[in-house]
Amino acid sequence: MPFLLLAAAIAFVFICGANDGGALLSLGIRHRGASSVVVLTVLACAVAVGPAVFGLGVAATFVDVTGTDGQLIFLVGTGVAIGLVLALTWRGIPTSITLALLGAVAGAAVGLGSAPDWARLGFVLALGAAAPFVGMAVAYLLGRAVRRVPVQRVARWTSAVQLLAFVGQSLAYAANDGQKMYAVAVTTFGVAGYPLALETQVVPVAAIAGVFMIGAAVSLRRVGRGATSTLLRMRPGHVISAEVAASAAVFGSAGLGVPVSMTQATTGGLVGAALNDGRRSIRWQYTAPLAVAWAVTLPAALAGGVLIGLVVNGVKS
């Protein structure tokens, strides 16, 4: 059993790297003069320093359960989330790991006879839904400001500013969305008999960041085909505005201890930045993954969590 628990935690971190890391790299590799190795290293380092710099407040929101029953609820939810993400990805249906984990844990709680904090969950989901629109608004305003800067000055500093914006985006991911990996690792390793104090233990944090980095590296070949790459014809100003706007939205929600999807906030930021070029500059059909993730992933995760929770509850009885 301990081996299976540890394997599940490692698999979850790897999937986060392949999914979240790949989406972030799809913009990061657009930096002029910056190789994929540079941006991948920046992202992995940000994930590694996350617990020490930002703490694990958002990770606690993911778990939001206590005691033995709470651990079981979270473990069942994690298993359902992993299976659902793999199933939806295999069928080519856009998904969100954050939504899958939140929905599956809530469903598992119901199936195992507990009452989730529906008010808290509703608040978290409401902020998560608002994040893309916040990113859109901030990126639109930034885009207008960038257009007023003389082209010669922008060109001179583009590479440095883009890389700095990516560093900020990576840190925002580590402070918020990326903490779901630590929530899974702490709970799973604890149940397996290996308690973790990630704010002070360097080795497990480095291991988590390493597995995440491997997952992101494996997905490098497909990042060019991601929705963010086909959403519009990007210019450096679009990328910078979207990354800064998404970072602002995600950092803001991290201050409230609320997890939101970095990829969805970034997509909203790209749309907002491109709106300065007119609505026709955006391929609106590629914004559909945001709606599909909410329409499919969340209810499917909730239903799956309830079903597996009922099965586990029956076995316990």
Image (cartoon, rainbow, N blue to C red):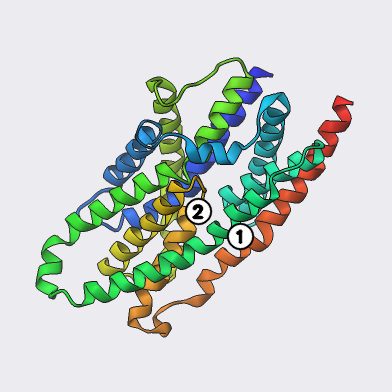
Q: Is residue 32 visible?
A: no
Between disc 1 and disc 2, whose residue precedes? 2
Disc number for residue 260:
none
The reply to whether dot 1 and dot 2 touch (C-beta < 8 Å) is yes
Give the residue drawn at x 41%, y 48%: 220
Binning the other alpha carbons within 10 Å of mark 1 as few (below 14), some (14 to 19) or many (20 upward) gives many
Figure quadrant of the C terminus:
top right
Q: Calculate the distance from the C-alpha at mark 1 to the C-alpha at mark 2.
A: 11 Å
Indicate whether 36 appears above or below 136.
above
Disc number for residue 261:
2
Indicate whether 275 appears above or below 86.
below
Secondary structure category for the residue under label 1: helix
Q: Percent from the top left, x then y, of residue 292?
A: 62, 64
- Name the mark nearer the viewer: 1 or 2: 2
Give the residue drawn at x 37%, y 33%: 48
Q: Is residue 31 visible?
A: yes
Q: Nearer the viewer, residue 166 or 179?
A: 179
Which amino acid type corresponds to the residue marked 1 in the rendered image? Answer: Ala
Which amino acid type corresponds to the residue marked 2 in the rendered image? Answer: Ser
